[in-house]
Image: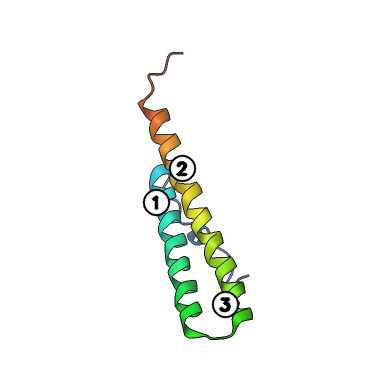
Amino acid sequence: MRGGVPWTAAYIAAKGDPIADLYEDIAAEEKARATYQWLIDMTDDVDIQDSLKFLREREIIHSLRFREAVEIIKADREQKKVY
């Protein structure tokens, strides 16, 4: 259960198209990055800023990896398949 609500498949935001799903993941990572940046700008506590900067950098790396995955899938789709 999540917050007293039973789990449902509606929690999964998958379209069935890997590229569309990856673009949604990229958008989510960018939103999280922006949120961490906003929080960093809101505090002057260095320890909190350091923690938030680590989390922000992690979101950036995730976004980059998702973008790489999109390019790999696009390249694979363009290759002629011979079976």
Q: CA distance from mark 2 to mark 3?
A: 28 Å
Of tags 1 and 3, the one toward the viewer is 3
Element marked by disc 1 = helix
Q: Can I make out residue 22 in this image? A: yes
Q: Secondary structure at mark 2?
A: helix
Within 10 Å of disc 3 (Cα), the crowding (few <14, some 14-19, many 20+) is some
Query: Which residue is outermost to the left?
Result: 78
Answer yes or no: do the residues labelled 1 and 3 have beta carbons within 8 Å? no
Q: Position of residue 73 (x, y in %)?
A: 43, 35
Label 2 neighbourhood size at 10 Å, few (<14), some (14-19), many (20+)?
few
Disc 2 to disc 1, C-alpha distance: 11 Å
Question: What amino acid is found at the position of numbered circle 3 in the picture?
Answer: Gln
Task: Compare residues 7 and 83 and report the one nearer the observer.
Answer: 83
Can you say whether 13 is above or below 16 in the image?
below
Q: Position of residue 65 (x, y in %)?
A: 50, 47
Q: Which mark is residue 23?
A: 1
The residue located at (49%, 79%) in the rendering is: 39
Point out residue 45 in the picture as x, y percentages from the top left corner.
59, 85
Mark toward the start of the polypeptide (2 vs 1)? 1
Q: Identify the residue position indicated by label 3 in the image.
A: 49
Residue in the foreground of this view, choosing between 9 and 57:
57
* Mark 1 closeness class: few <14, some 14–19, many ≥20 residues within 10 Å: some
Residue drawn at x 38%, y 34% as measured from the top left? 74
In primary-sequence order, the first of circles 2 and 3 is 3
Residue type pointed to by label 1: Tyr
Taking the image as shown, residue 48 lies to the left or right of residue 20, namely right
Q: Residue at x 38, y 29 (%)?
A: 77
Horizontal side of residue 44 vs 19, given as left or right: right
Residue bearing mark 2: 68
> What residue is rendered at 61% in x and 73% in y?
51
Kind of residue at badge 2: Glu
